[in-house]
Structure formats: C-alpha cells, structure tokens
Amino acid sequence: MGSEPPSPPAVVEEGGEEEEEELSGGEEVDSRAAPGRGSLLTRHPCSRTWWSPGTACCPFTTCVLSIHYLGKKFVGDLLCDGKIRWVETGQIFNSPSAWATHCKRLVNPAKKSGCGWASVRYRGQKLVQYKTSWLHKYQPSGEMSLASEGEDEEMAEDEEEEGKASVPTEDRNRKGKPEQHEISLVQRRGDRERVPVRYCTLGTRDSARDPHTLVELSAFSAINRFQPFNVAVSSNVLLLMDFHCHLTSSEVVGYLGGRWDTNTQLLTVLRAFPCRTRLADRDSAPAVEEEICQNLFMRGLSLVGWYHSHPRGPALPSLQDIDSQMDHQLRLQGSNNGFQPCLGIICGPYYHGNQGVASTITPFWVVPPPEQRPNDYGIPVAVEVTYVQDNFLTSDVLNEMMLLVEFYRGAPDLVQFSQLWSPDTTVLDKIKGSLSGHAPKDQAYSQILEHVYTQLSNAR
C-alpha cells in the first residue's frame, strides 16, 4: 500500500538441500509476475507442485497457498510452472521450502530452515497431508521412505514456537469457543497483578522468561533519539477502538488505516478496523483480514498500524507485544522499499489503576536493539500523538459498532453491562463515560449512541 511501486519480482532459486536453501541465490525477473498489493495483513503465499498444471493452477491460481507462522499469515499465488509468487512483494520462489524459509526469517531472523511440506498449506491443508495421501495411493510401499525426515521435526518446532509467541495479525479474537471461564471485570484480592519491569533489567533474550512480562515504555529522549515521525489520530478511531475493547473480557485486536506523508513525515490515522474474529481462529481470520484489506483499498487508505486490548491489565506492551510490533514495523517498511512507520496502540479498558472511568490508551513504537547487542529485546518507546476531534460520528463507524454488538451477542465472555464497575457506576455507565472523551464536535452523537447502548443492554 506504499506510494512507491515495489521492485520487480525476483525469482528465489533453490540451492543444496531443500531445508537449507540459499535465499540469496541467483535472481531473475519474471515478467509474468505482477506485484500484488502489499500490506501488513500478508495475504498471498504459494507452493510447488506435485499436482499437474492442467488442473486448478493453470494459468495460475491465486491465494491458494499459505503459511501460518507465529501468528502471521503469508499468502501467495501458484503459477502454472509450479513456482510460487508472494503477492506482497511479487517475489517468485522455486519451491515451498524456499518460500517458507524466507517468510519465517522475516518473523524470526534466527530461523535456519522452513520445510515447505510441513509449513505451506494448499487451500488450508498442509502439503505434507497431500503428499502422504498421494504416496499412500500410488506408492504405498515407499510412503515411509519417501517422506521427509525433517517434516515432523519442523512441525514440532513450529508448534513449540507458536506456544511461546503469539502475534496479533490474524491472531486475535475469534468467533469460535472463547475461554472456558468468564473473567470478572472486578479485580479480586486473589488476583495476581502483573508488575511492569524496566527495559534495562531485561538483558539478553531468555526463553525461560515469561512472554507476558509487561515492560515500561521509555521516552525517545531517554535513549538519545528523536521521534522520527509525527502522528495524528482521529477521535472516531479512538471511539471505535475503545468501544471494541470494552465489549468483552477477552483480548481483542484490530487494524488502523490512514496515510503516510513522506514530505511532512506525518502519519495520520483515520479509521479503525476491528477484527470480528476470535483469538487464534485460523479458519475465519483470513476472510476477516481480506475484508479489511478491501475496505482499506476502497477508502484509499494504507495500513498504518494495529491495536489490541489488555482487558484488566495495564496498557503496557508485553515481551510478545514488543516482538509483534517489531515484526509489523519491518514488514510494513518492506512493503514499499521505503520507511513507513507502523503505530501500535494498547487499550486498557478495565484496569482498576486507570484514572476515573476512561480507558488508558497507549501509543507505542519499538526501537531495534543496538547492533552490538542483536539478541536483546527491542526497546518499547512512547509515541507522542496529536488527537484530532472529528466533526461528527460517521455512519460507517456507527455501523461497525452495531456489527460488533451482533458479533459478541450472547457470548460467554460478553461483559455484563449491568454489573457495577464501582459502588455507584455500572459498566454501561463506565463505557459511556470513557467514550465521551472521544466525542465529535456535533453533540447529536450522544443521541445516536443511545441506540447502540440500548442494543448493548439487550445483548445478553
């Protein structure tokens, strides 16, 4: 979604064994591969064939191949010669493993290989499953000997990594089964509150450290830096985001649309796009993200960031959030071969350390660790933001609020709006008070929102 066209697609050659392919091998331009519309919502992957080009893949099949890794999704096109075109950049890969290794290294630079059979999915199903079925049907005696010995190890390794890190891209909020227990909004005495730590106490990455550890934000000045961009956020963005985060006791996520002006170095956030899906729902997430991509495109907006909630905790990034933000920054910057910031926002609606009824909203960015300490965590820094009051509540924001009410209607983790937030304030009153801080100039908005609040009261 950058203003500059991406560079011509490069063909990534295979070299040596499949799992240790050289990604910097010879490159050549393939004139058939038109670069796709890149975005943080990585949408297009592909795979090499053991199916024939005479079927669904000729002249090529779009969006049928995907990689899910550490909460990120990569999608691409399957070309008629069996090569893979990654739509975000237009790069062409000669095999599933070359593409899988490249994508995984974007998320995890320490990743050494990415077995294509175990990592790439064709129409949602892993290639190794197709391979096993084919071998069972046509070469039953050679099934075990032909299967890659690294596939089981690769899948086990990915599953272990997925357990250690989760990312909010297609990662968050799902319509499926929520957590078995409902989380009370009121902080109980027995609850253990997560105490944020200072960044200087973290040191080198440690796999034994709790990835949910919260980290205090640093100031740019504290690390001898200047904030490299300015940010302006629309009040309607805050209102919709705050509303979304208030609806459920589960964590939610969404994306931010806007524009980046390279001349003024101003990032303008104009629209929030809540993900109406549940955490880790791999089935519905692609469709939700595709809808958001289409909405961004139709409005002429670029993807400029993301938000998520810490329902009952401080609005500070965890170690997972820091890694996720850094990943988003690198990917968004790489979509147009030029610098474009990616804004992260955390919203804490029900933390009892908040002042009054208003949610705590924390914009942040991550500065890479020093080059001499590449294994350290990125440095989370507070971003100074100018909040711009909109003139009125737009119809699409109102419509999105109603869609969210319908999505969470009857869910076990839907907040009980009649519950007391404080001795003299219900949760519904708390929501109204928090949203009033993002009110547009037109005072008629309060009458419009009353309809939404009525629907909330009936949502149980």
Image (cartoon, helix red, strand yellow):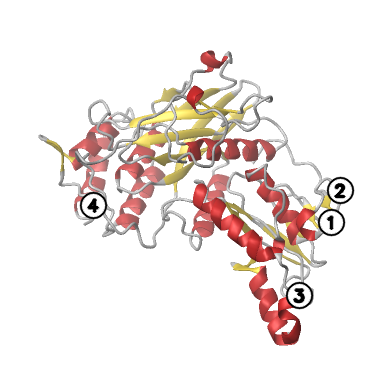
Residue at the disc numbered 3:
146
Q: Tell me where residue 410 appears, x and y as whole percent.
A: 26, 60
169 or 398, nearer to the observer: 169
Report how far apart the C-alphas of labels 1 and 4 lie in the structure: 57 Å
Q: Nearer the viewer, mark 3 or mark 2?
A: 3
Q: Amino acid at mark 4?
A: Gln
How dense is the environment of label 3, judged by Cα within 10 Å: few (below 14), some, or many (20 and up)?
Answer: few
Residue at 48 percent across and 39 percent down: it is 209
Q: Nearer the viewer, mark 4 or mark 2?
A: 2
Q: Which mark is residue 25?
A: 2
Residue at 30 percent across and 39 percent down: it is 312
Q: Nearer the viewer, mark 4 or mark 3?
A: 3
N-term-proximal mark, 4 vs 3:
3
Residue at the disc numbered 1:
14
Residue at the disc numbered 4:
455
Residue 107 as seen in the image, left or right of residue 358:
right
N-term-proximal mark, 4 vs 2:
2
N-term-proximal mark, 3 vs 2:
2
Q: Nearer the viewer, mark 3 or mark 1?
A: 3
280 or 17, nearer to the observer: 17
Helix, strand or loop at label 2? It is: loop
Helix, strand or loop at label 3? It is: helix
Q: Tell me where residue 155 appears, x and y as whole percent.
A: 61, 61
